[in-house]
Image: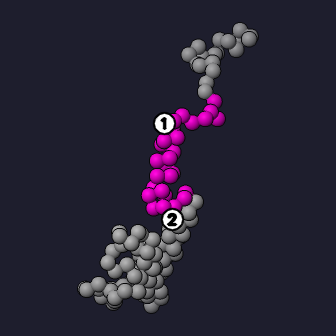
Amino acid sequence: MPTAVRAFRNPRRRRYRRSPWRSPSGQEMAMLGKLFLDHPRTVNETYGEHWYVANRFGLLMIVAGLGTMLHGFVPGLMTRTGSNMVKKLHGEMAHRQPANLRPPSSDAHSVPPQGWHLEYEI
């Protein structure tokens, strides 16, 4: 190596670094499992199934939120969009739960609870 180049070299720099493409350690695999696999397993889904369901729910909530915002500007438009989507998603979520964990009235078309006023729906 030429002398000029050697003078600028950092003497503390490691000569051999671990490759970024190395295989993960057991601790790293446990962390990845906790982040990506533990929750889907608790709801009896694969990672792909959980990804699809969560993204579908999220997209439907965004669409309903935009409709509700439009309703805020023009109250005559989309008068029940937000409420209907909340009921639909709640019904789907309640239906997905195991039977022993479902709330008593998990039917999406059930009678509204006492004190529920339809005129306050969005």
Amino acid marked by disc 1: Gln
Dot 2 or dot 1, earlier in sequence: 1
The residue shown at (41%, 82%) is 108
Q: Position of residue 105 (x, y in %)?
A: 34, 80
Q: Which of 48 and 55 lies nearest the eye of the viewer?
A: 48
Q: Position of residue 61 (x, y in %)?
A: 48, 72
Q: Which mark is residue 85?
A: none
Residue 76 visible here? yes
Residue 97, relative to residue 72: is it above or below?
above
Check disc 1: other Cα within 10 Å, few if <14, some if 14-19, many if 20+: few
Residue 104, relative to residue 29: is it above or below?
below
Query: Disc 2 and disc 1: Cα gap in Å?
Result: 27 Å
**Is 12 situated left or right of 73 in this image?**
right
Amino acid marked by disc 2: Ala
Q: Which residue is mark 1?
A: 27
Residue 77, relative to residue 6: is it above or below?
below
**Is 48 situated left or right of 100 in this image?**
right
The residue shown at (48%, 49%) is 35
Give the residue furthest to the left.
Answer: 115
Give the residue furthest to the front.
Answer: 100
**Mark 2, secondary structure of its residue:** helix
Q: Which residues are magenta?
A: 19-47
Q: Which residue is mark 2?
A: 54
For the C terminus, the image quarter is bottom left
